[in-house]
Amino acid sequence: MPSKRNKLTSHMLTGVVLAAILLGALGCEKLRVRDRPNIVYLLLDTLRPDHLGCYGYERDTSPRIDRMAAEGILFTRFYSVCPWTDPTIVTLFTGLYPQAVLPPALRKVAIEQKLPMELETLAEILRGEGYRTAAIMDHPGLNRKRNFDQGFEEYVNLPKKLGWHEWVGTPPETVFEEFTAVVEKIEKGPFFLYVHLVYPHQPYTPKPPFEGMFGPGFRKLSRHEKQGVINCYDGEIRMTDDLVGKMYDLMLERGLLDSTCILITSDHGEGFWEHGLREHGNSLYNELLAVPLVIRPPKAMNIRPGTVRDLLSNIDLFPTVLEIAGIDTPPAIPGESLVPYLEGKGAPSDGRIIFSENPHSNIPHGLACQSEKQKLVYEAWKPIDDLAVFRKNVSAGWPLQLFFDLQKDPLEQHNLAGRIPGIQLDLGNALVEHKRRNDEHRKTIAPETAPLDPATRQQLKSLGYIQ
Ligand SMILES: [Zn+2]
């Protein structure tokens, strides 16, 4: 395997040579580094699309995001590769499925897994191509110790900088101050700015005036106080929306908006007892996998606003960002750029299967795939690491499989496992092939871990993140 330095150097040289050839051929100034668009990548943790106005929610939780969606492209059937944070971010940063990078493991081990240094991250590629790169992370686990800062010349981990916040999140005004300071540093660009806001992750604690905006809260999380829980979640979404709006206004005031692509998404959804479960990481049902995606392209792309209804996955975001930046995606990246969809040229997704996985959780450890019509979930009670055993179990429909007819049963309430064995097996074989491909890739990467300090481990334990 070539070293990262060699990979970066070769990528930079390829980029320079390509740019020179294209500039010569086209006489085109568009390819100059300084003319590349800025990219602001906003990750709003735990945000369900069906709680946003632009996705049809009846409450006014997201006026500013709705406006950006109206100015750009809204993706209505967009799913995450994983129902919890860390593996999803590994995918967004590397373009690879979580199990192609990280060995299957219990979550208490997974939260110490590092993003391997030998991988070339999105930020590293962009930096190698002349981008200024920065990240603002309001999440304690996505830190330098675990290599999530790879490729970022500015890396602000707010919990580490300001002290632990017990997942409530850094006050929005402080996040905005950091955002302003970072934009001032890099705005001569082109720049890539990744912002990971921990809200609306639980505990749902919207600050005034958003507290109580959608009704009273709750005293103790319980099934009986479900509406109070949702009221607080919605209030925190509105608080997040207000902050996103301020970021938008700042870019407008500084004359950056036209030259900037704004991307808004989430890492996973949240369960509100649809299948007897709440929060996330604990199933592969679609209330945990569906995530919003809004892309507001830069003016130069000349994109007409619209809606994309194709079945798509966030494995595609890595090549999408690179194409928007005018950079070729490295080989062996499994996703496909969404730029054709932005341009109204997306291919019909009939026949496409998208994959989600949870091999780094407490329990269950699942692998899932869905087509336009059906969805299969394979669940196991320990990490799924042996391909031969997995293949045998899939063929036997054992130990537990969930199979849904998404067209008749979009809320995944009626398990049809064993009722249409041919189609179930087709999807099962797709899962086996998915695992085989990713296992092979993972074997080329040396795993790295960063042990948690005792205080962080205790805090994660108290939140139920690890046992
Ligand atoms: Zn998350």
Image: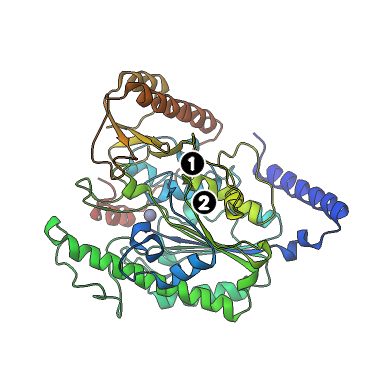
Labelled pair 2, 1 in contact (Cβ < 8 Å): yes
In the rendered image, which residue does mark 2 sit on?
147
Q: Amino acid at mark 1?
A: Glu
* Helix, strand or loop status at disc 2: loop
Taking depth in this image into account, of 237 and 56 the one nearest to the observer is 56
* Helix, strand or loop status at disc 1: loop
Residue at figure coordinates x 65%, y 52% from the top left: 323
Q: Find residue 347 and report its image quarter.
A: top right
- Give residue 181's position: percent from left, percent from top: 55, 76
Residue at figure coordinates x 30%, y 35% from the top left: 404
**For residue 454, above or below residue 204:** above
Q: Is 400 left, or right, of 355 in this rendering?
A: left
- Give residue 221's position: percent from left, percent from top: 17, 60
Residue 303 bears which disc, if any? Answer: none
**Ligand 1 falls in quadrant:** bottom left
**For residue 60, above or below residue 313:** below
Quadrant for the C terminus, please. top left
Q: Amino acid at mark 2?
A: Asn
Q: Is 296 left, or right, of 311 in this rendering?
A: right
Asked whether residue 376 appears in the rendered view, the answer is: yes
